[in-house]
Amino acid sequence: MAYKISDECIMCGACEEECPTGCIESGDGQYIIDKEACIDCGSCAGVCPVEAISSEE
């Protein structure tokens, strides 16, 4: 199970800096997570100031 970033993303960059695998990158209007590289650690969700990141179920 990987994490996903919703449209609530404000492009602050906190998640990208926190990701231990570097699987988060800037997309078109919001950051995106490479599902194949995501290790489901939740580090990104813990630092998101607008709670735009959640686990994909």
Image (spheres, rainbow, N blue to C red):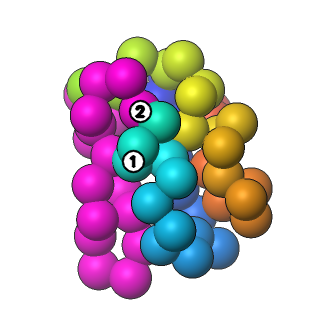
Q: Quadrant of the C terminus?
A: top right
The numbered mark at residue 19 is 2
Q: Nearer the viewer, residue 43 or 37?
A: 43
Q: At x 73% / y 59%, what residue is drawn?
A: 49
Q: At x 58% / y 28%, what residue is drawn?
A: 43
Q: At x 38% / y 82%, what residue is drawn?
A: 29
Q: Nearer the viewer, residue 28 or 15?
A: 15
Residue 32 locus on image (x, y percent): 36, 56
As for residue 53 lying within the magenta part, the answer is no
Could you tell me the amino acid type at mark 2? Cys
Q: Nearer the viewer, residue 5 or 20?
A: 20
Mark 1 residue element:
helix
Mark 2 residue element:
loop
**Left or right: 14 as drawn, with respect to 34:** right
What's the distance in space between the residues labelled 1 and 2, CA to CA?
6 Å
Residue 20 locus on image (x, y percent): 37, 23
Does any portion of residue 56 appear in the rendered image? Answer: no
1 over 25 or under it: above or below:
above
As for residue 20 lying within the magenta part, the answer is yes
Residue 56 locus on image (x, y percent): 58, 37
53 over 49 or under it: above or below:
above
**Left or right: 42 as drawn, with respect to 17:** right
Look at the numbered discs 1 and 2 and tell me whether their residues touch, using CB distance below 8 Å.
Answer: yes
Q: Which residues are magenta?
A: 19-36
Classified by dominant secondary structure, the portion drawn in magenta counts as: loop
Tag 1 residue: 16
> What is the crowding at mark 1: few (fewer than 14 residues within 10 Å), some, or many (at least 20)?
many
Could you tell me the amino acid type at mark 1? Glu
2 over 7 or under it: above or below:
above
